Amino acid sequence: MARYEISNEVRPLDRLITGFASSCGYEIQTVFNDLLRFIIHGFSPGAPPISNWKYKRQQNASFMEMTAEWTRIMQKQIGRSGWFDAFGELHMAYCSKPGQQANGQFFTPSHICELMVMCAAGKKETGQRMGDPTCGSGRLLLAYHAHNPGNYLVGEDISRTCCMMTVCNMLIHGCVGEVICHDSLNPGNFVDGWKVNPMLAWTGIPTIKRMSMEEYLTGRNLPASPYIIRKTMPAGGRKHKTDSPPPLQTVFKM
C-alpha cells in the first residue's frame, strides 16, 4: 500500500504531533488518538477526568499547542473552501507508514464528496436528518453541511478513532448532530456515542455531550428538530427560523 502524503497545509500540525511522540517515546498513532480525546474532553463541560491519561502538566501544554494549531489550520481552510479535514489527512498518513499498512484507511477524496453532494442536490431544506453509516472522518457529512446548513447530522462507524475525528470535525464546522460508535449493520451493538453542539443554536457555545445507552435507544425513533432550529417569537407573534449556528472557528479563536 502506497504511503499517503500530508498536504502542506497540515504539515505544521504533523510536526507538532510527531515531534512530541518522538520526544516522549510514544507511538504517533497513540498521540494522535490522545489529541482527539483531549479536544473532545475540553469541550465536554462537567465531564469526569479522562481515563488512563498518562501525561504530565508540561506535556498537557503540548496538547494545547496542538489544539491551537489545529484550530488555526481549520479556520484558514474552512474560510477558503467551506470545509476541511485535517485529522483525516493525518490519520491516513499515519496508518500508511511502514509497519502500519495493515491498519491503513483511505477516506473518500474531498472532490468526490463534493460531487456526491451536488449529485444529490435538490430543494434546500433545514431540520432534516442526514446520516452516514460508515462516516470515517466525517467528510461526506461536512460536505453536505457546507451546502445544506441547518440539518441534523448522524455519523456512524465501527472505529472509535474515526468516530472521534468526526466528533471534532463536526464541532469545529458548527454542525449539530451525533456520532455513534457501533457496527451499523448491527445497530444493537452500541459501543459509545457523542452529541455534538446540542445547545449551539441557543448559546452560541460549542459543546460535546457523551451519549448514554438510554439516549441511543430512545433517539433511534426521534425526529431531528429539537437540536437543530431555534424558533423565536418576534414582535407580532410570527415565528421564524434562525440561520445555521456559526462554526467553531468563528466562536473559538486562538
Image (cartoon, rainbow, N blue to C red):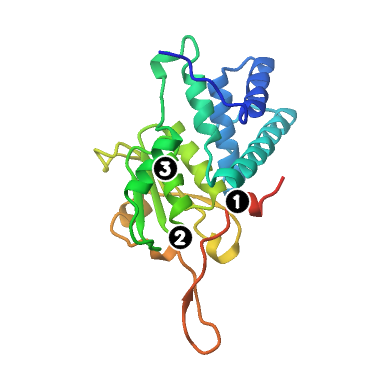
Name of the residue lying farthest toward the left: 185
> Of residues 157 and 44, which is closer to you in this image?
157
Residue type, mark 3 in image: Glu
- Give the Cα distance between marks 2 and 3: 18 Å
* Vertical side of 183 occupied by 200: above or below: below
Q: Earlier in the sequence, mark 1 or mark 2?
A: 2
The residue positioned 39% from the left and 44% from the top of the image is 155
Q: Would you name the residue on which mark 3 appears?
A: 114
Which label sits in the foreground, 2 or 3? 3
Q: In which quarter of the image is the N terminus?
A: top left
Q: Earlier in the sequence, mark 2 or mark 3?
A: 3
Would you call the spot at circle 1 few (<14 residues within 10 Å), some (14-19), or many (20 or more)? many
Q: Position of residue 4 (x, y in %)?
A: 49, 19
> Of residues 43 and 253, which is closer to you in this image?
253
Horizontal relation, residue 220 to residue 69: left or right? left
Q: Can residue 214 be seen in this view?
A: no
- Give the Cα distance between marks 1 and 2: 15 Å
Residue type, mark 2 in image: Gly
Mark 3 secondary-structure assignment: helix
Residue type, mark 1 in image: Leu
Q: Where is residue 137 in the image (x, y as percent from the top left)?
A: 45, 36
Task: Give the numbered dot on residue 150.
Answer: 2
* Vertical side of 136 occupied by 43: above or below: below
Q: Position of residue 238 (x, y in %)?
A: 47, 84
The residue positioned 32% from the left and 47% from the top of the image is 119
Q: Position of residue 105 (x, y in %)?
A: 41, 24
Mark 2 secondary-structure assignment: loop
Task: Give the numbered dot on residue 20.
Answer: none
Horizontal relation, residue 127 to residue 39: left or right? left
Q: Which of marks 3 and 1 is nearer the N terminus?
A: 3
Q: Quadrant of the C terminus?
A: top right
Task: Give the numbered dot on residue 248.
Answer: 1
